[in-house]
Every structure is written in structure tokens, then in C-alpha cells.
């Protein structure tokens, strides 16, 4: 069946997705053609119209204008086929991930706001206002000042690393001595705040903040030493006239600059390089909006912790000592507010705070995270090495992560039960099991669901209950 073309301008023709071919429409529409409503059927036009005459566009009893496509004339025929190709339903498994779900996303947001608003009102009616700042901040005493001074004096260690690199640049010390000095400096970077926290009865949140800052400084110093070691090796090879293979367009100039170290120390990155991509200016309005968001979401996070998480854990038993069904019920009840807090924490730190810092420093590369929420399993981490296998690299990545999690939680709590370490390392067999399940069902979504269950539903609520009860037992009270 050949249908003559509708009379339309080139731009209008492009907008509604129709194409001319031998005086008719395509039998098999392309993706662009499918954007127009399939109920709109092009009818015959007069020969004068096909020849470009427009004096009859607004006349004629048999012609009908379609208001949603300006300037294009359509006439409908009942005989034109409505079904012209094979298509799947929008919610079928083959097409559900290839189309927009903006409407369903908006519905989920509306439902979440409605449900959580009711829960907030119910919580306030049942428990009242529970927020207490004493657990987080001890503003009435000076016991947290040693931690603050420790945080400020951590700048000594990047300065020491700079002097070591200066000595290495001028060839006053050998490579072996350089490596040994960097090991001493990085080790002291962690031991110094650990000793300060253990000797001071500080607030929990300040202890966690200091350990997080110390771990960040440690990671930066490792990158600083490693990068300068590699730049020295490239410089020596260049001086000897040896060919150095560099696959990326990078700045491989070996110059130990104090200005570069200072910028790297405060920059939102753990990877040292002599120079970074920079933005042309600071967007003050955008920066102010991010600061307001940071304040709001930090408040939301504190509200959830005090109003929901604290009452749940206070009315719970030790998960490894009490009734099993009761422990499962507490874990499941704790999982949802814990998930909200984790999302708020991630958004506040990895998105808002790092972007605020990047904007102030005009730091250009702001891909601080990738779409980890689409991870097929908990093993989707960036552990690459040319010297060891992927499995060994994965094991090392989890081991380092487990140690840092234990440091940041156990030290401020003054508890050494290794729950965080065990929780992280438990993910290694989970990776193996997830891979087996994915290979069996040939579906990556199975792995993604396993990731979410082990990461947010089971692991974190369990660790919260374990550390809470061990902390209360250490203090000899029930909060």
C-alpha cells in the first residue's frame, strides 16, 4: 500500500519523523519515525499540493488539520495499518531497561515522601523529640581539644615527605633510604592519632572524624611517594637516553614543588600528579546551593539517627546472644533507616563536600564516584595491577579496606572486636558465590540484588547492633 506524502516543509517533516521514498512512506519506520504517534496517518493530498502549491492548505472539506503538528495536514484512513512491525510491551524484560522510567521514578519519589512523612509523624507522636547532642558533641568540656590539635599537627607528615623527596631529587640519599623514610612517615601518620584517641575520652564523632582524616592523609602520602618514585625512574631513564613508553598525554616532569604538594593535600583526590585540570572560575551561586544542600542533608542524617536508629538499637539485644528471630526482626527494622543514613552520608561527603572543595580550588576532574549502585557484585572495585592476578588484587583491596574500616570504627569506640574487619572480608566469599549464581542464571541483575542485600540489608545493620552493644557493655550501661 503506497500513501502519498503529506505537504510539509523540510523542518516540519523532520519534526514528525516522516520520510519520502518514491512518493510514499517507509514500510518499516526507523526510530525517529516511531517518535510520532502511530495513530497519525498520512492521507492523500491533491496534486497541486505535491507540486508545492499552498493555496489550498487552509481549504477543502476533506482535509483536517492536526493541531499538535503546526503546518502539517493529515487525513485519516481506516484502512491504514496500525500494526506494522513486531514490538514488545513496555514492561517486558527485553525492553524495560531500554526506555525512560521518569514517570515511575516520580511516582516512587511521591510514595517515599508520603510514606516517610507518615512515619516521621508517627515517630514524633510515639517518642517525642529525642535528639540529644551529648552523644555527638561534648561542647561543655575540653576533652576533645587534643583531637583537634592532633588533626592540625598531621600537616607535619606531608611536610616531612616533601623534604624526603627534595633530598631524593638532589640525590643526597639513595632510593632505599627514600623508601624507608616514607614507610616511617606513613606509619607514624596512622599511629599518632590512634595513640591520641586511645589516651583521650573523646566524643565518638570526633574520634571517627580524626581517624578518617588520618587515613586520607596516609593514602595521599602513599600516592605522593609512589608517583614521585615513578617520575624519578622516568627522569633517570630519559637522562640515560632510554626510551620510555608513556601511553597517556601526561605531565611526566620530575619537579618536587611545595606548591604542588600543598594543592594536592587539600584537593579532593587521593592521586598525586604535578598538575590537574582546572576550571576557569568559581561559580558562587552554584557553590552556595551546594552548601545549603550539605546543611540540609546533614540535618536529615542526624534526625534519622537520633529519632529512628537510636530507639531501635536501645530496644534490642545483642544479635549473637539473644533470640534469633528477634535479632532478625531488629536487623530488618534497622536496615531501612540505616540505608537512608548511608545514602545521606555518601551524598553529603562524596558528592556535596567534594564538589564544594573542588569548586573552591577550581579542581576540574569531578568524577569522584561512578555508578556503583549498578555493581554486579561487591567485587566491582578498582584493583588493577600488572604484577599480580585479578584475584590477588581483589583480596588485597578488601584487606586494606577492612583494616581501614576497623581503624575508623574500633579506635573511636575503644573496642577491638574486629566486627568491621570480618564484615568486609566476608564479602570475598560473597563475590565467589555471586559469580557462580550469575553464571548459572546468565543474569547480572541477580548479582546486583545480592550486592544490595549483603551490603545494606544484612551487613551494616548487623555491625551497628554489634558495635552498639559492645560499646554499652564496655561502659557498663544501657543507653
Image: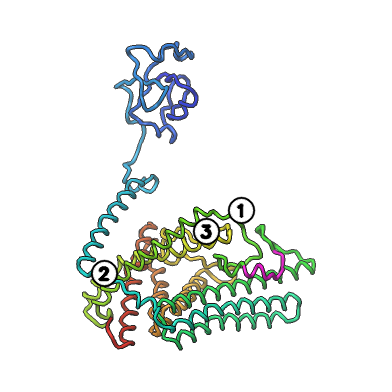
* Pointer 3 with pointer 1, Cβ within 8 A: no
Residue 183 located left or right of residue 435:
right
Picture quarter with the N terminus = top left
Q: Which residue is mark 2?
A: 129
Q: Could you tell me which residue is drawn at 31 percent across and 77 percent down? A: 465
Task: Determine if the magenta segment contains residue 205.
Answer: no
Task: Find numbered disc 3 in the image and state the secondary structure of the residue it sits on.
Answer: loop
Q: Which residue is mark 3?
A: 367
Q: Which residue is mark 1?
A: 280
| For residue 11, above or below residue 171 | above
Q: Nearer the viewer, residue 405 or 423?
A: 405
Picture quarter with the C terminus = bottom left
Q: Could you tell me which residue is drawn at 26 percent across and 55 percent down? A: 114
The quadrant holding residue 434 is bottom left
* Pointer 2 with pointer 3, Cβ within 8 A: no
**Residues in magenta, as a range:** 252-262
Task: Give how far apart the Cα atoms at labels 3 and 1 are.
Answer: 18 Å
Which mark is in front, 3 or 1?
A: 1
Task: Find numbered disc 2 in the image and state the secondary structure of the residue it sits on.
Answer: loop
CA neighbours of label 3 inside 10 A, class few (<14), some (14 to 19), many (20+): few
Q: Could you tell me which residue is drawn at 62 percent across and 72 percent down? A: 224
Q: Nearer the viewer, residue 146 or 340?
A: 146
Please, which residue is most extreme toward the front here?
Answer: 140
Amino acid at each position: 500500500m503506497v500513501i502519498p506524502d503529506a505537504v510539509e516543509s523540510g523542518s516540519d517533516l523532520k519534526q514528525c519523523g516522516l520520510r519520502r521514498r518514491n512518493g510514499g512512506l517507509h514500510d518499516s519506520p526507523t526510530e525517529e519515525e516511531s517518535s510520532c504517534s502511530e495513530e497519525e496517518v498520512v492521507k492523500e493530498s491533491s496534486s497541486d499540493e505535491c507540486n508545492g502549491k499552498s493555496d489550498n492548505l487552509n481549504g477543502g472539506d476533506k482535509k483536517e488539520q492536526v493541531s499538535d503538528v503546526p503546518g502539517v495536514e493529515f487525513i485519516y484512513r481506516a484502512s491504514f495499518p496500525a500494526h506494522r512491525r513486531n514490538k514488545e510491551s513496555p514492561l517486558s524484560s527485553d525492553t524495560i531497561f531500554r526506555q525512560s522510567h521518569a514517570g515511575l521514578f516520580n511516582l516512587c519519589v511521591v510514595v517515599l515522601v508520603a510514606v516517610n512523612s507518615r512515619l516521621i509523624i508517627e515517630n514524633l507522636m510515639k517518642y517525642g523529640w529525642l535528639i540529644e547532642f551529648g552523644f555527638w558533641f561534648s561542647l561543655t568540656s575540653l576533652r576533645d581539644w587534643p583531637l583537634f590539635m592532633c588533626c592540625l599537627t598531621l600537616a607535619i607528615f606531608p611536610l616531612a615527605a616533601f623534604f624526603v623527596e627534595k633530598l631524593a631529587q638532589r640525590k643526597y640519599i639513595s632510593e632505599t633510604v627514600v623508601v624507608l623514610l616514607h614507610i616511617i612517615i606513613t606509619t607514624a601518620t596512622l599511629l599518632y592519632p590512634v595513640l591520641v584517641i586511645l589516651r583521650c575520652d573523646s566524643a565518638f564523632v570526633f574520634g571517627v572524624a580524626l581517624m578518617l582524616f588520618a587515613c586520607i592523609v596516609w593514602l595521599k602520602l602513599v600516592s605522593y611517594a609512589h608517583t614521585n618514585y615513578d617520575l624519578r625512574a622516568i627522569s633517570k631513564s630519559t637522562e640515560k637516553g632510554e626510551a620510555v613508553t608513556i601511553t597517556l598525554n601526561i605531565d611526566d616532569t620530575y619537579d618536587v614543588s611545595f606548591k604542588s604538594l600543598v594543592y594536592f593535600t587539600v584537593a579532593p583526590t587521593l592521586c598525586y600528579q604535578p598538575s590537574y585540570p582546572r576550571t576557569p572560575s568559581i561559580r558562587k551561586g552554584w557553590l552556595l546551593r551546594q552548601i545549603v544542600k550539605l546543611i540540609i542533608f546533614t540535618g536529615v542524617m542526624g534526625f534519622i539517627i537520633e529519632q529512628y536508629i537510636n530507639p531501635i538499637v536501645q530496644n534490642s539485644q545483642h544479635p549473637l546472644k539473644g533470640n534469633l528471630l528477634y535479632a532478625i526482626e531488629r536487623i530488618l527494622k534497622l536496615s531501612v533507616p540505616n540505608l537512608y543514613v548511608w545514602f545521606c552520608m555518601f551524598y553529603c561527603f562524596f558528592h556535596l563536600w567534594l564538589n564544594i572543595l573542588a569548586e573552591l580550588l577550581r579542581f576540574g576532574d569531578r568524577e569522584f564516584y561512578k555508578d556503583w549502585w549498578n555493581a554486579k557484585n561487591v567485587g566491582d572495585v578498582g584493583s588493577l595491577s600488572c604484577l599480580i592476578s585479578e584475584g590477588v588484587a581483589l583480596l588485597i583491596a578488601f584487606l586494606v579496606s577492612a583494616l581501614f574500616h576497623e581503624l575508623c570504627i574500633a579506635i573511636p569506640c575503644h573496642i577491638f572486636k574486629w566486627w568491621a574487619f570480618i564484615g568486609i572480608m566476608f564479602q570475598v566469599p560473597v563475590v565467589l558465590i555471586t559469580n557462580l549464581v550469575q553464571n548459572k542464571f546468565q543474569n547480572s541483575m541477580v548479582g546486583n540484588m545480592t550486592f544490595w542485600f549483603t551490603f545494606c540489608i544484612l551487613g551494616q545493620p548487623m555491625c551497628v547492633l554489634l558495635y552498639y552493644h559492645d560499646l554499652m557493655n564496655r561502659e557498663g550501661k544501657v543507653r
